[in-house]
Image (cartoon, helix red, strand yellow):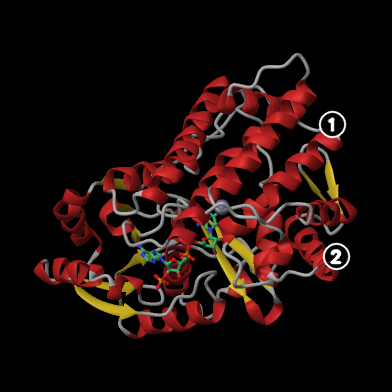
Amino acid sequence: MNSFEVHIPTRIYFGSDKDTAFFDRLKDYGTRVLLVIGGGSVKTTGYLNMVTKQLEKRGIEYFLFEGIEPNPHAATIDKAAAFGKENDVDFVLAFGGGSVMDASKAIAGLIHDNETEIWPFVLGEPKYKTLKGSLPVTTIPTTAATASEVTAHAVISNPAIKGKSPVSYPFLKPSASWLNPAFHTSLPPETTRDGASDILSHVFENYILGGNDSPLADRYSEGIMQTVLVTLPKVLQNPENEALRGQLLWASTMALNTMQIAGRVPTTFLLHNLEHALSGYSPNLAHGRGLAILYPAYFKWLVENDRCVDRLALLGEKLFDIKTDNRFETAAEFIAEFEEWLNENGLYERLSDQKIPADAFPEIADYALKVYGNGEKIDAAGPVTKPDIVEIFNLTEMQATEQTI
Ligand code: NZQ
Ligand code: ZN
């Protein structure tokens, strides 16, 4: 086992009947809340009314900021922070998907530090790591995907420069989060699929690169992967089933709370680095979709380069019960099985299907290397250079696109 630190300060309320407990807790954070939502899904579903009624009942005055985009824009976050300051709010309540939760964390930081612009604070920009604190952040996630309801991260997009980059601080971890699967029954199939892909990535990344030192982290991660592999097809068939929605939601929270990597060698999240560069280039690309496109190509690239083949083979044994005498064979069979799962669940695509042309690959690789590496390479169980990244992107073009769903 390698040394590690775990800090999970979020009070989690899971279940549709945890409303009273959660909203009672919010009184601890003040009486004026900035309520942040996205493009309106929580309004059309009627969920927003349920939440505002609970706030009113407790004498918590809310100031609604609406319009956080998927892949949240820095400029919108700046506007929301100004609105929160004008109204002298005590804390922030994010009600939406990862984009709304991430935006809310950034907003809470800007208000606390009396700053006006978030972009200079992201990774790769001059004020990175200089935020001093944040207002308390509370969340009600409406997607099963990012785990932003417990993480220290906020991923910000800046379409003006085709950028996407995170801010991360322990103080951005939400103080309290209400996980209500009932709010997930309205999720469209695409967002459900993309979210499931994101959950998988959070356990895949370090599982593959982090070595063999923590069998418990391995079993924990495999449990999450199994849950997603088995549950996603059921949810797509039964979108209104709250019990199934709850399985995915809890898997998402558990997948990025640090337990999944504890004891392994810490590593970069290479697929995330590449995907953030892709959705920075193309802001309409959903994070989980970009990851799904990258998986098979990246896994094949690892095998071609004899990197982490034993870990891919272990995934084959544990997830698909593949047994051969040769780790390359087992890894190859794992990739084939996983590709089939992606295809069956509507997640098997090429970058060109998302209108990202091959001639943009070098520019996207450059961005990933500049922000997430040293300009030349990213360390991911060995160096990953510009030609490597372009090769991985090119390999995605080999992926068939005939969807079975
Ligand atoms: O904006 P609204 O109208 O709410 O619609 C959203 C949006 O169009 C819709 N939606 C959300 N909940 C819904 C719903 N529609 C119907 N019913 C519901 N219950 O779904 C669309 C996508 O929402 P979004 O929040 O963008 O998706 P997701 O949760 O996947 O978040 C993606 C963002 O999180 C970042 C990603 O990079 C991306 O910017 N990440 C954040 C992380 C973190 N904070 O730790 C880690 C992740 O790896 C990830 O990078
Ligand atoms: Zn992710």
User: In the image, residue 352 lies at what x, y percent?
Assistant: 73, 66
Question: Looking at the image, is 210 positioned above or below residue 347?
Answer: above
Looking at numbered disc 1 in the image, what kind of residue is underneath it? Asp
Quadrant assignment for the N terminus: top right
Q: Residue furthest left?
A: 57
Q: Nearer the viewer, residue 95 or 182?
A: 182
Which residue corresponds to the image point at 52% horizontal and 56% vertical from the top-left?
194
User: In the image, residue 233 lies at what x, y percent?
Assistant: 45, 44
Q: Nearer the viewer, residue 281 or 368?
A: 281
Residue 247 location, quadrant: top left
Q: Nearer the viewer, residue 305 or 376?
A: 305
Q: Which residue is mark 2?
A: 362
Which residue corresponds to the image point at 72% horizontal and 16% vertical from the top-left?
324
Label 2 Cα neighbours within 10 Å, binned few <14 / some 14-19 / many ≥20: some
Which residue corresponds to the image point at 63% horizontal and 52% vertical from the top-left?
348
**Residue 27: which disc?**
none
User: In the image, residue 400 lies at what x, y percent?
Assistant: 71, 53
Residue 332 location, quadrant: top right
Q: The residue tagged with tag 2: helix, strand or loop?
A: helix
Number of marks present in the image shown? 2
Q: The residue tagged with tag 1: helix, strand or loop?
A: loop
Label 1 Cα neighbours within 10 Å, binned few <14 / some 14-19 / many ≥20: few
Query: Left or right of 294: which side holds 255?
Result: left
Can residue 330 be seen at all in this image of the molecule? yes
Check mark 2 vs ligand 1: CB closer than 8 Å? yes or no.
no
Q: CA distance from mark 2 to mark 1?
A: 24 Å
Question: Looking at the image, is 312 positioned above or below residue 160?
Answer: above
Looking at numbered disc 2 in the image, what kind of residue is underneath it? Pro
Which residue corresponds to the image point at 80% horizontal and 58% vertical from the top-left?
369
Mark 2 or mark 1: whose residue is earlier in sequence: 1
**Residue 306: which disc?**
1
User: In the image, residue 202 lies at what x, y percent?
Assistant: 56, 44
